[in-house]
Image (tube, rainbow, N blue to C red):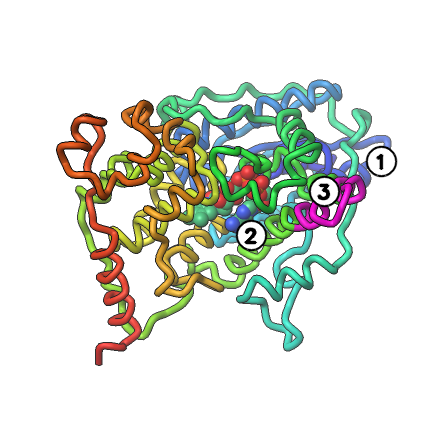
Amino acid sequence: MHLFWHRSDLRVADNLGLADAADAVDDEEAVVPLFVLDDGILEHGSPVRVAFLLDCLADLRAAYRERGSDLLVRRGDASAVVPAVAAECDADRVVWNHDYSGLARERDEAVRAALDEQGTRHEQFHDAVLHEPGAIRTNAGDPYSVFSYFWKKWRDREKRDPVAAPDGDALADLDGDDLPALDTLGFDEPDANPVEAGQASAHRRLEAFCEEDIYRYDEAREYPAEAATSRLSQDLSFGSIGVRTVFERTVQAMVDADDEPAREAVEEYQRQLAFREFYVQVLYFHPETVTENYDAYPKPIEWREDDAELQAWKEGRTGVPIVDAGMRQLREEGFVHNRVRMLVASFLTKDLLQDWRAGYAHFREHLVDHDTANDVGGWQWAASTGTDAQPYFRIFNPWSQQPEYDPDAEYVKAYVDELADVPTEKIHAWNELDADERDSLAPDYPDPIVDHGERREAALAMFERARGEDD
Ligand SMILES: Cc1cc2nc3c(=O)[nH]c(=O)nc-3n(C[C@H](O)[C@H](O)[C@H](O)COP(=O)(O)OP(=O)(O)OC[C@H]3O[C@@H](n4cnc5c(N)ncnc54)[C@H](O)[C@@H]3O)c2cc1C
């Protein structure tokens, strides 16, 4: 028997480790699929993500049942559970796909050690990315810290094709385990309503996107009300779709493109897939950046602490409509549009002058697509502390970004009910209206909690002190 341990790869097709395990079994053997609800990992979970995980597991189990097999679902410490299940089902080999965060790598090391001690063979595959960390390096052999150079090599390198789902013959005929209820894992029902989980839904999203929106992606992706992005982030995070499958479909879209602008739009999308892998390799080589600034300023950055302002940001009550819309989208859907993620992150770090780690913690709690590498990468970029970060003196002005990227305030009105009937030009000028006018237009919506111009100056001074420029 071969035991296949699922982690962030909750699918049967285009799963390199699973395909290898299925290929390796002979007529007498079969693959036993396992998922471990690991307490050490659940500790970092949140209601919306654990609920989504359970939905993905139900979907994965259904895929195995369709093939005459089932999914084992066990709870506990993976370094105890994996060897125990291997022994229980007489598996002489355990296979899984790499996960690249520091926490996952520590866990894998412990599982490998326990399997070695038991004398069970094991093998791991690079599955979650098209090019594993370290595969793409500078000419001097170092990992890249600048995305644009990484991207050129990533783009030009040959990619693997997706692999098929295993045949039912290669899978063990077994009785799977029931999935636990959310509350037995210690989580409340989430408030957010994310997109539907599972392999078929992920494929539908990919197909719908590649038929149309991919050809306008390079421009439309900036406008949150357009909803013109692929919405695959949670599927890539939980692995309900394989990245080779996504990439292959974009190659087909490139072939089907009518003209050069359409091909450029497809390439812009592929560039985002490379961004994801860039951040994976940053985290792989710098696991400490989950908590530490990547770019160490000579002096500490003197972030402010102000619980009331932090709370207003979290609740979407800053009085800056596009920021509030983003923070409310986060709570309602477990998702925020990328342009708005950049804006809310900039607002927290450069207008409220608060530590990016407070924002990261909140995103980690509420984003269904939370992915350590991308989340840390995004936050450190916005806070000007990361690789390839935006320079500290480039500070988003929400009052100009809002009319530029949400000209009809469609996105704002979709999430900020108090402003639903307020004329668009008043929403864009909310900071310039006098308090009485604001009160008459939307009595329940707050005045801006900060003056952007003043806070911008304070942010510049804060970064200059951290750079030692006031000495
Ligand atoms: C502060 C901040 C936090 C973020 N946290 C996360 C996170 O936890 N998980 C996450 O997947 N993305 C994160 N992102 C990146 C990005 O916002 C999301 O990937 C994107 O909005 C997801 O929507 P989509 O699937 O429609 O993306 P699309 O635009 O359709 O892009 C396709 C895929 O490419 C990848 N991608 C796109 N943009 C980026 C990017 N800027 N960086 C890295 N990968 C990217 C994602 O896997 C995405 O699903 C964050 C960005 C910021 C600024």
Question: Looking at numbered disc 3 in the image, what kind of residue is underneath it?
Answer: Thr
Instruction: Using the rendered view, name the quadrant where residue 229 is placed.
Output: top right
Q: Secondary structure at mark 3?
A: helix
**Is residue 125 something one can see in this rendering?**
no
Counting residues from the start of the chain, the first of labels 3 and 1 encountered is 1
Place of residue 441 in the rendered image (x, y in percent of width and height, measured from the top left) = 22, 27
In percent of the image, x 85 and y 35: which residue is there?
Answer: 26
The residue lying furthest to the right in this view is 27
Place of residue 218 in the rendered image (x, y in percent of width and height, measured from the top left) = 60, 46
Q: Which residue is mark 1?
A: 26
In percent of the image, x 31 and y 75: which residue is there?
Answer: 298
Crowding at mark 3 (Cα within 10 Å: few <14, some 14-19, many 20+): many
**Is residue 65 something one can see in this rendering?**
yes
Q: Which residue is mark 2?
A: 100
Q: Secondary structure at mark 2?
A: loop
Q: Secondary structure at mark 1?
A: loop
Question: Looking at numbered disc 2 in the image, what kind of residue is underneath it?
Answer: Tyr
Q: Is residue 260 magenta?
A: yes
Predominant secondary structure in magenta? helix
Counting residues from the start of the chain, the first of labels 1 and 2 encountered is 1
C-alpha separation, residue under disc 1 versus residue under disc 2? 31 Å
Q: Is mark 3 within 8 Å of ligand 1?
A: no
Place of residue 164 in the rendered image (x, y in percent of width and height, measured from the top left) = 79, 35
Question: Looking at numbered disc 1 in the image, what kind of residue is underneath it?
Answer: Asp
